[in-house]
Image: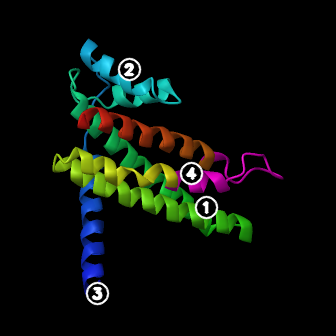
């Protein structure tokens, strides 16, 4: 691949991500709507497969565009929230990296920033495939995300260190991102079958 082709592909990817991100943040959040019974049944089917049913259920119900939302709409919600979340976590980790006090913390955060970049790229491509209604490709594009997040999580200490664990907030942000990625994968699998 030539440098020019790589630059064009990278520019297209960044442009696509920005368009998706702007669509997400411009989406006016109305007050939470109550899901109708069929929608809640789909939400339950997804959320009962995850580590935190309450978080999953809350995310879906707070982001419903209509009370009657099908699996495609729920998948869109999961993709939007995951993309929004990973963007926020990436910015947060980058700010921690900029203020890193030790080489060890800097190394860990450098890995995490790289991994969040992988997830961002995966979900940019997944959202593009979703928009093209190519749901199998959407799942293929999402598939690197759990491993990338796991690489970051594997480096973060869960033990409180002296005087305070510098990763305390990042651990919770990673937990939420892990659930959102799983929501996208599970809803996407249901949608594609």
Where residue 8 appears, as percent x and y from the top left, is 24, 78
Q: Are marks 1 and 2 in contact (CB under 8 Å)?
A: no
Q: Which residue is mark 3?
A: 2
Going 29% across and 83% down the picture, which residue do you hit? Answer: 1
* 155 drawn magenta: yes
Q: Quadrant of residue 33?
A: top left
Q: How is the image coloured?
A: rainbow
Tell me where the magenta segment starts and ends, as one range: 148-169
Where is mark 2, residue-wise? 44
Give the residue displayed 36% in from the left and 40% down from the top: 184
Task: State the CA–CA distance, disc 4 to disc 2.
Answer: 25 Å
Question: Of the numbered discs in the image, which one, if any, rests on residue 46?
Answer: none
For the residue labelled by badge 3, is the local secondary structure a helix, a strand or a loop?
Answer: loop
Query: Farthest residue toward the left?
Result: 132
Check contact, mark 4 vs mark 2: CB within 8 A.
Answer: no
Determine which residue is flagged by label 4: 150
Secondary element under disc 4, as helix, strand or loop, is helix
| Residue 26 image point, x, y percent | 25, 47
């Amino acid at each position: 691949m030539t440098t020019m082709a790589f630059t064009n592909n990278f520019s297209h990817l960044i442009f696509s991500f920005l368009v998706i991100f702007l669509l997400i943040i411009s989406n006016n959040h109305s007050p939470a709507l109550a899901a109708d019974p069929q929608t809640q049944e789909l939400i339950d089917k997804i959320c009962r497969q995850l580590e935190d049913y309450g978080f999953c259920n809350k995310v879906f119900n707070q982001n419903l565009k209509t009370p009657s939302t099908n699996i495609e709409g729920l998948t869109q919600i999961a993709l939007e929230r995951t993309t929004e979340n990973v963007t926020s976590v990436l910015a947060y980790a980058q700010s921690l990296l900029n203020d890193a006090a030790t080489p060890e913390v800097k190394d860990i955060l450098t890995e995490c920033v790289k991994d969040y970049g992988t997830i961002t790229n995966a979900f940019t491509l997944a959202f593009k495939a979703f928009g093209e209604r190519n749901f199998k490709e959407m799942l293929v594009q999402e598939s690197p995300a759990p491993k990338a997040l796991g690489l970051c999580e594997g480096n973060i200490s869960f033990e409180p260190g002296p005087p305070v664990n510098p990763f305390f907030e990042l651990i919770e942000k990673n937990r939420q991102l892990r659930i959102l990625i799983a929501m996208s994968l599970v809803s996407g699998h249901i949608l594609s079958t």
